[in-house]
């Protein structure tokens, strides 16, 4: 995984609450055995009609959304299934961060392990972001803060170890493998 | 000694290394369930790192999500129609062979939905930590296990180390008093709970379901309740083990036997929340007040009693978007809405007692013309038992399709899907947009309510079909 320190991008807004992982990547695309290429399926039933043509009204299909790496979504983003294909699809599409007031547990864990930043902000900041699509934000992972266009900053919580791994581009598995002696001891004493 | 909750006891018993401000706990995993959809990339991760599966003996593999339910495809008489699914099945067999993991493959008599066969084989036991790359892993909490869904990267972590890095979640007690009335099932109870606390009401928490209405439930019913914990946002739901739990497990393939059984039961009896232990939150539910429930929207919290109407929130744009997808209007009654598909199946409601419930309504009746009904047993063992008890005959006599086991129309990966615009009353767990097929309109309900809809050809009150 690549180290992440800061991210600067414009936002794209999906103002719906409870966007579930079946919307992010429908189950019919989970018969893959790799992680690659899922971006073209992200939000597929919202992006395309039954004939496969892009729906011009859908926000991701509008020209101003091109290149936006920050997705602002309604409360409880990523609820539902444990499919890691959801963050894989969002990353492959080009998103690097998701901002909401609440992010579902399994989706948040999966995102952190792949370098997609799950950012929870307060209601007031969230309401402002929902009302101002396309604004440019700076996310600083070192200070765990978001800088708004007026220069004000808003802190966000992020689990300390995940933050360390993201800042240094290291994998959590390496840390777990270093625990081998403790794991063996546990197995010997807990038959 | 400080009184502890059931969750705290299990958590502390499985801490290999306790959490600190800088690092999460290293939590030992007793049982790892894997399936064909969320494991291929994890095996690839092992291969890339030159790593082995640390404990193949603690790993149980099956195939269920993308597998066919047509007997000819399952038993190899014709090729699997969805070629990418066939590829996943081959990959699973190869990965398990290469890494030394026993797999209950497509033709196996022990195969089935991963959350049905774990308990059925006695691999799911009180006091265990159980994970799987599937959010409905919460099902196993019905046995007093700490069981939760994980992503594929974490599947790789468990394969390689038998451990996970976890922060300690909060606890939520759901106290259910009273008694469920006739025709009000465990499914109605959990739908009512989700309706009450909301689809993110349990986020960050482990739920413990407790109280007289929970203690009165059979193991099949407890599994239905715990299964849908994730639909309230909780990764895990659990119920303290008791005599019902022990009676279910006795004699099963992976359950202890002889003196080891007696020692295990003695240990399992300790797995209860101590008097005076504190939860972070407590919610109370009165079972006496509940009715059969049905969903009307596009998440499981959008639920009403079957005699109710679609709620009207004209100012709420998200509610309006959901109703537009469902083709429903605020104020419209649920009863009488015509349906095209009925699905009895899934890890929520495809065990033997679920099929018995559906058969209670269908026995001696025919499904309405214009309705397609699919009955998909949760495992091959459930299938055999349902056939031996004459349930399969009831379904086929009524005009329903009787299939091989798998996730089937709950997730629609194998070609078992609902057409765009069609209404499906389903005993599964998710009514998200497109869940059962692009454009499909899902109404979640119990097996009784599903069977009643099949007979009536419309949403119907199951109580009308149970009066003698």
Image (tube, coloured by chain):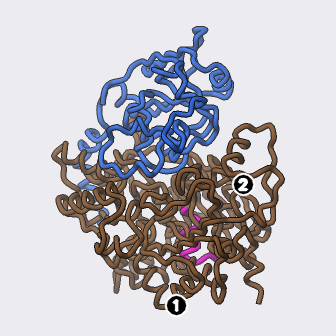
Chain colours: A blue, B brown
* Residue B3 seen in the current view: no
Residue at 64%, 84% in the rendered image: B360
Give the residue number, with chain letter if any, for mark 1: B390
Give the side of residue A170 with respect to residue A15, left or right.
left
Q: Earlier in the sequence, mark 1 or mark 2?
A: 2
Q: Position of residue B151 (x, y in %)?
A: 40, 48
- Quadrant showing the N terminus of chain A: top left
Give the residue number, with chain letter if any, for mark 2: B196
Label 1 neighbourhood size at 10 Å, few (<14), some (14-19), many (20+)?
few
Residue at 68%, 63% in the rendered image: B175
Residue at 58%, 54% in the rendered image: B420
What secondary structure is the stretch in magenta mostly built from?
helix
Looking at the rendered structure, the secondary structure element under dot 2 is helix
Q: Compared to B96, does A96 lie above or below?
A: above
Which is nearer the eye, B16 or A176?
A176
Q: Position of residue B266 (x, y in %)?
A: 44, 77
Looking at the rendered structure, the secondary structure element under dot 1 is loop
Q: Compared to B167, does B419 lie above or below?
A: below
């Amino acid at each position: 995984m690549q180290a992440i320190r800061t991210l600067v991008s414009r936002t794209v807004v999906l103002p719906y609450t409870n966007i579930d992982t079946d919307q992010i990547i429908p189950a019919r695309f989970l018969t893959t055995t790799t992680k690659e290429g899922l971006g073209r399926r992200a939000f597929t039933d919202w992006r395309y009609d039954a004939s496969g043509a892009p729906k011009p009204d859908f926000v991701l299909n509008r020209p101003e959304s091109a290149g936006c790496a920050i997705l602002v979504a309604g409360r409880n983003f990523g609820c539902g299934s444990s499919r890691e294909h959801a963050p894989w699809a969002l990353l492959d599409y080009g998103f690097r961060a998701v901002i909401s007031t609440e992010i579902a547990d399994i989706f948040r864990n999966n995102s952190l392990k792949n370098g997609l930043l799950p950012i929870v902000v307060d209601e007031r900041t969230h309401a402002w972001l929902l009302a101002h699509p396309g604004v440019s934000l700076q996310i600083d992972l070192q200070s765990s803060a978001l800088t708004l266009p007026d220069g004000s900053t808003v802190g966000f919580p992020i689990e300390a170890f995940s933050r360390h791994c993201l800042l240094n581009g290291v994998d959590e598995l390496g840390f777990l493998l270093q625990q081998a002696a403790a794991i063996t001891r546990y197995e010997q004493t807990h038959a | 000694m400080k009184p502890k909750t059931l969750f705290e006891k299990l958590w502390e018993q499985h801490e290999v290394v306790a959490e600190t401000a800088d690092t999460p706990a290293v939590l030992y995993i007793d049982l790892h369930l894997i399936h064909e959809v969320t494991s291929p990339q994890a095996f690839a991760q092992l291969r890339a790192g030159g790593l082995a599966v640390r404990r193949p003996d603690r790993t149980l593999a099956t195939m269920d999500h993308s597998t066919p339910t047509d007997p000819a495809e399952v038993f190899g008489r014709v090729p699997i129609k969805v070629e990418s699914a066939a590829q996943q099945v081959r990959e699973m067999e190869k990965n398990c062979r290469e890494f030394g993991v026993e797999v209950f493959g497509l033709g196996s008599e022990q195969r089935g939905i991963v959350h049905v066969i774990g308990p059925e084989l006695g691999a799911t036991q009180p006091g265990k930590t159980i994970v799987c790359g599937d959010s409905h892993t919460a099902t196993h909490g019905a046995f007093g296990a700490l069981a939760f869904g994980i992503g594929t990267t974490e599947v790789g972590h468990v394969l390689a180390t038998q451990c996970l890095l976890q922060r300690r979640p909060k606890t939520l007690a759901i106290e259910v008093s009273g008694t469920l009335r006739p025709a009000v099932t465990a499914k109605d109870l959990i739908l009512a709970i989700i309706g009450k606390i909301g689809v993110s009401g349990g986020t960050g928490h482990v739920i413990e379901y407790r109280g007289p209405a929970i203690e009165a439930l059979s193991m099949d019913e407890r599994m239905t309740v715990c299964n849908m914990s994730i639909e309230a946002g909780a990764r895990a739901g659990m119920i303290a083990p008791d005599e019902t739990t022990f009676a279910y497990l006795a004699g099963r393939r992976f359950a202890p036997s002889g003196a080891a059984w007696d020692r295990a039961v003695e240990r399992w009896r300790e797995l209860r929340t101590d008097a005076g232990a504190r939860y972070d939150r407590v919610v109370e539910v009165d079972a006496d007040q509940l009715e059969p429930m049905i969903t009307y929207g596009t998440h499981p919290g959008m639920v009403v009693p079957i005699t109710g109407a679609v709620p009207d929130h004209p100012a709420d744009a998200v509610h309006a978007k959901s109703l537009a997808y469902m083709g429903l209007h605020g104020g419209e009654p649920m009863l009488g809405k015509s349906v095209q598909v009925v699905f009895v199946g899934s890890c929520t409601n495809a065990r033997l007692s679920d099929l018995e419930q559906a058969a209670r309504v269908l026995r001696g009746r025919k499904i309405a013309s214009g309705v397609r009904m699919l009955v998909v047993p949760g495992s091959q063992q459930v299938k055999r038992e349902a056939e031996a008890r004459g349930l399969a005959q009831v379904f086929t006599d009524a005009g329903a399709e009787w299939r091989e086991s798998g996730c089937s129309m709950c997730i629609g990966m194998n070609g078992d899907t609902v057409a765009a615009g069609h209404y499906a009353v389903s005993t599964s767990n998710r009514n998200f947009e497109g869940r059962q097929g692009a454009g499909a309109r899902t109404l979640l309900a119990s097996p009784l309510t599903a069977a009643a809809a099949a007979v009536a050809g419309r949403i119907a009150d199951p109580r009308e079909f149970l009066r003698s």
